[in-house]
Image (cartoon, rainbow, N blue to C red):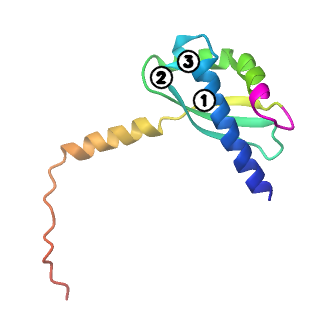
């Protein structure tokens, strides 16, 4: 039952944070090319790790600005999601999408012949 509660809270928090960044934060660096990839609330709802994917721009500057905006984001989060506590937000740069793109680019350059479908197995 506890896992279901956390999963539901994670989903609602992710949705709310995405909405806050897209519609309520006035800094254009924070609402155009950022995606919240995951939210991981602690069991006691006091801490929240937030995965952030940044598509363009200077990632270090954007992450710094995101951390500076944490107070505003938390106040807006409290308005949108009912949680027992207001969690401390920890923004983590998620470069998973970038790694996937890099791997796909490398794979597309490889010249690997297709295997024959008529391989005889002994």
Q: Which mark is residue 30?
A: 3
SS at badge 1: helix
Relative to 92, residue 70 above or below = above
Count up the numbered dots: 3
SS at badge 3: helix
Q: Which residue is mark 2?
A: 33
SS at badge 2: loop
Q: Residue drawn 38% across and 42% down?
A: 100
Q: In terms of sequence position, does the residue under pointer 1 or pointer 2 come before the other?
A: 1
Neighbour tally class for label 1: few under 14, some 14-19, many 20 plus, Cα within 10 Å: some
Q: Residue drawn 77% across and 36% down?
A: 47
Residue 107 position within the rendered picture, expressed as x and y whole percent measured from the top left: 25, 47
Relative to 93, residue 60 above or below = above
**Image depth: mark 3 or mark 1 in front:** 1
Q: Quadrant of residue 12?
A: top right
Residue 40 position within the rendered picture, expressed as x and y whole percent measured from the top left: 68, 42
**Image depth: mark 1 or mark 2 in front:** 1
| Along the viewing direction, whichever of 116 and 36 lies nearer the viewer | 36
Q: CA distance from mark 3 to mark 1?
A: 11 Å
Neighbour tally class for label 3: few under 14, some 14-19, many 20 plus, Cα within 10 Å: some
Question: Quadrant of the image for the C terminus?
Answer: bottom left
Residue that extends furthest to the right in the rendered view of this protein: 84
Q: Which residue is mark 1?
A: 18
Segment tinted magenta in the rendering: 78-85
Q: Is residue 77 magenta?
A: no
């Amino acid at each position: 039952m506890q896992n279901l509660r956390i999963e539901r809270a994670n989903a609602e928090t992710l949705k709310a944070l995405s909405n806050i960044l897209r519609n309520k934060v006035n800094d254009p660096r924070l609402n155009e090319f950022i995606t919240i990839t995951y939210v991981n609330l602690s069991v006691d709802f006091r801490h929240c790790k937030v995965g952030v994917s940044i598509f363009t721009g200077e990632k270090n500057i954007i992450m710094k600005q995101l951390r500076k905006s944490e107070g505003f984001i938390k106040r807006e989060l409290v308005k949108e999601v009912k949680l027992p506590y207001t969690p401390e937000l920890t923004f983590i740069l998620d470069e998973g999408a970038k790694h996937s793109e890099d791997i796909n680019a490398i794979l597309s350059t490889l010249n690997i012949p297709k295997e024959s479908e008529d391989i005889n197995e002994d």
